[in-house]
Amino acid sequence: MSDTFDAILIDRDADKRQSVSTVRLGEADLMEGDVTVAVEATTVNYKDGLAITGKAPVVRRFPLVPGIDFSGTVTASSHPDWKPGDKVVLNGWGVGETHYGAYAGRARVNGDWLVPLPDGLTARDAMAVGTAGYTAMLSVMALERHGIRPEAGPAVVTGAAGGVGSVAVALLSRLGYQVIASTGRPAESGYLKDLGAAEVIDRAELASAARPLGKERWAAGIDSVGSNTLANVLSMTRYGGAVAACGLAGGMDLPSSVAPFILRGVSLLGIDSVMAPRPLRLEAWRRIATDLDMAKLNALSTTIGFADIVRAAHDIVEGKIRGRVVVAM
Ligand code: NDP
């Protein structure tokens, strides 16, 4: 076996102009860490799109191998929890931002960042879920911790045809929620209904400036869009309901008022996947293995090769990707 491997490398010149190229690296080129992993599958998340296109300052060291998540097999380890042959999953911890990431044949990371590949999932399944799907699960768990149950009323999912959204629709419907999917792609209505949406609404309904309070339409929400969309979702949440905020695909601002919080007791739950503590990660991956319908996971994911990563990165920031993209390495 060759001891070098293909990797995507982001660099920038003295004028801070970013370049993206495919290079050959060896293990000696990797960054510090006590576990080396042969990357078998990775994925293209929205954040990877921002990193590769340079649209937002995701990459904070140059040069850098991007890619915020991977699944693969341990090839070398001096970490007590891991030995060669172990199947692992990594999400976040700055990988693909400050530490060499997933878009390479090998990754060397801190063993504390890894979780075991859940029983019953292949490396490709885990990356069909990816950071987007694991974030959808963290969002569902946050709603549950708040005491939200399907009996409370419908759950809205924004950015529904995207990665977080598609997995959130599949998870919530499997758990018994009546799911209202908000999308800007009406042509994906059939896709969203197949994933379990009871109703599909046009995202334009949630796009203009929000009134302090609107008609109470749902008891819960998972929002991957932010900005006016999140403000509208909050203003239309029923008394005592909760909304998990996990994304900014529509903007980082939140032009809301305190009305939903102080007049309807609505709660806004923040979701971060990158630094989420290990027990929460283990629970999220355990729940994914039990609560996500594998047939739906297959239906919402497409597989591409290493050579297609850069194109997919551009597509995802342009909102052209449906569901999840798996990169088979
Ligand atoms: P995708 O691009 O797959 O999905 C985002 C979806 O948002 C799009 O498919 C589209 O859905 C909708 N959308 C895009 N642009 C706009 C817009 N201008 N106005 C309204 N809706 C829009 O990305 P992901 O699902 O991978 O990620 C979604 C968000 O979640 C991103 O902001 C990402 O950074 C964030 N994220 C956060 C994490 C965390 O730790 N908190 C972890 C993972 C992701 P449709 O076509 O259906 O309208």
Image: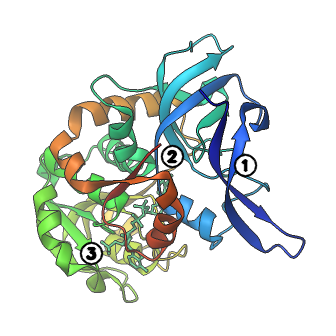
The label shown at residue 98 is 1
- Per the model, the C-alpha gap separating discs 1 and 2 is 16 Å
Location of mark 3 (residue): 183
- Per the model, the C-alpha gap separating discs 3 and 2 is 23 Å
Crowding at dot 3, Cα within 10 Å, few <14 / some 14-19 / many 20+, comes out as many
Location of mark 2 (residue): 273
- In this rendered view, identify the residue nearer to me: 37 or 140: 37
- In this rendered view, identify the residue nearer to me: 243 or 191: 191
Q: Amino acid at mark 2?
A: Ser
Which is more N-terminal, label 2 or label 1?
1
Q: Is residue 267 left or right of residue 309?
A: left
Residue 290 visible from this viewpoint? yes
Label 1: state its secondary structure: loop
Label 3: state its secondary structure: strand
Q: Quadrant of residue 263?
A: bottom left
Ligand 1 occupies quarter: bottom left
Determine if the C-beta at disc 2 is less than 8 A from ligand 1: yes
Which is more N-terminal, label 2 or label 3?
3
